[in-house]
Image (cartoon, rainbow, N blue to C red):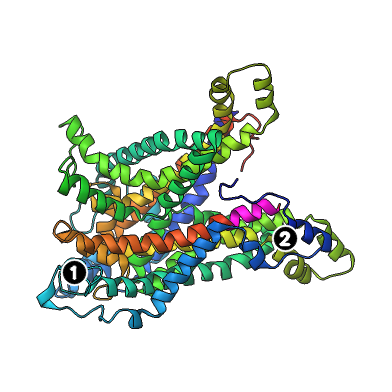
Amino acid sequence: MLLAYIARRLLLTIPALIAMSVLVFFIIRLVPGDPVLVILGTRATPETVATVRHDLRLDEPIWTQYAGWAGQVFQGDLGVDYRTHEPIRKMLLTRLPVTLEMAMLAMVMSALMAIPLGVMAATRRGVADHGATALGLVGISIPDFWLGVMLILLMALVLGWLPSSGYVPLRESVWGNISHMLLPAFTLSLNLAAVLTRTTRAAVLDVLNRPYIRTARAKGLRERAVVVGHVLKNASVPVLTVMGLQLGYVLGGAVIIEQIFALPGVGQLTLNAVLARNYPVIQGAVLLVTFLFMLVNILTDSLYAVLDPRVRLSGR
Amino acid sequence: MSASSSVPITTPLATQAERTGVRPKWWLILRRSNRTLIGLALILAVAVLTILAPAISRYDPTFGDFNLTLSGPSTAHVFGTDDLGRDVFARVLYGYRVSVLVGVVSVLAAVAVGAPLGLLAGYFGSTVDNLIMRPLDLLMSFPAILLAITLVAVFGTKTSVTILALALIYFPIMARVLRGSVISVRGEEYVDAAKAIGAKPLRVMLRHVLPNSLGPLVVQASISMGIAILIEAALSFIGLGTQPPDPSLGGMLAQGRDFMREAPWVVTFPGLAIMLAVLGFNLVGDGLRDLIAAER
């Protein structure tokens, strides 16, 4: 049942991916200027221009161009970088682990902060509640890139506890890797934690009002057992949903954070490609991130169904 | 779900409204949410600073005094000066102009396009709903920042492009929010009553359904304005928004990074300025959401 559901959802992403690839392909063709001249410079002879144009298949009708490109993409070939002739797939795959590591670490940090805080805000009310609300509001209002800059200033430049930027692969040094990841991941996590605290608080409050909680209390369970055994389990559905949505957000937000901390991830690659008007790379990166984004959404929805048997596993 | 809500569900105001069948005036309702009032005060303060910028600061935001580079906050320069001797306070004031303009205009545009679509989709349902919402779902499957960056890559770094990109990000969200509340309102008795006395669909939609389903849209718009300001600042920060020498809060931050150790004020104040404006919109959105929840 569940596998069938996931399979159906995956099938449904195919039209979405096709539509998206059309969008990406044509939007980029709207750019004024001739990509061949961008590659060769304005001093190239007409013969060279014609050869390169033919090599890149830019002399064919646009629909043929799209079909050719889409056919390659379908086989996992995202083309090559116009300038360095490096395969784009390889460029993306070497950078993806950096982005994923940062995203995962940020998610874990935000959950560690937000879930206890949200539960406390809902169960204790009073000061804890006001504190969590205020923190939440400030957390969603802080620009993450500013927070990143401020953290570099404090932790790296003034205190000298952590490196300000750069990346060390996990294979070379575990501490080197983690110490370079802490600041970027924390920067990303604060916004997430703010939203997640609110979600947790609302979910727990909602569950606390249910009759089965009254039953659990009435049968003499200690409050701690009620909260851990009944409330948390039932409140986890909306919390996990929001975390799934946030993972998608983190993949987009990585563009800015990776830039601040000089992390060689997919976000940095995308931004540099945009600044250099390197369209094949932009296409590849946007496709990859959007595909991941959709994949995460499907997984979130499936998890939703696992945790809450009442959710009907219909097509949508 | 409210912390500030010292708002009990039945207040004298509410009972009075129940008795007379008249909705209390909006300012009487607003008065009951401290959060909304503080948020409105913040937004108002930012608006006044933005509009009166030339009167408030005696410095030209683009004029550099080379005898006074990187000088700390003082009575002459409240927020200090940057590497070119420009007054940071003046630059923050003028930087607000672009940020607030982009945030407000892009979301208003998104509401203008998204609200009619959401109203139609929610009111008619079935085929109309599918025709309108499925393409919008597709647009929403792009991560927001990535969509903005792609558009800027294609159409160039202009304020109008930033506004367009943000409007494109937000109009499907506005449509979806309004559609949701329209669906919950369209089955109400007063809607049936209006139809029963022969009101045309357009009249039912505009006179009866729309006014009663606007609340969540207003909340969403307020919160989105805050996020739009954040995204504009982020785009300017990575060099894809407002271009120097025009002052922008994100741009000031990016530029101040090179010497933040010697002159932390250059990066500190623009960030605080962004945060206060965003906080204002978030407080209003949050407070209004609680008021709506209390009214139900």
Name the residue tied to disc 1: B82
Query: Residue furthest toward the left?
Result: B67
- The disc at residue A164 is none
Residue at image location 23% in from the left, 47% down from the top: A263
- Between the C-alphas of marks 2 and 1, the distance is 55 Å
Q: What are the residue bounds of the magenta stretch?
A: B288-295
Q: Is residue A281 left or right of residue A168?
A: right
Quadrant into which the N terminus of chain A falls: top right
Taking A237 as reference, is B220 above or below it? below
Query: Magenta stretch mostly in which secondary structure?
Result: helix
**Mark toward the start of the polypeptide (2 vs 1):** 1
Q: Is residue B243 above or below residue A302?
A: below
- Label 2 marks a residue whose chain is B
Residue that numbered label 2 is attached to: B123
Callout 1 secondary element? loop
- What is the number of callouts on the image? 2
The amino acid type found where label 1 is placed reads Asp
Residue nearest the viewer, comparing B268 with A84: B268
Q: Chain of mark 1?
A: B
Q: Residues within 10 Å of mark 1 (few under 14, many from 20)?
A: many
| Number of other residues with Cα within 10 Å of mark 2, as a class: few under 14, some 14 to 19, many 20 or more | many
Q: Quadrant of residue B21?
A: bottom right
Q: Amino acid at mark 2?
A: Tyr
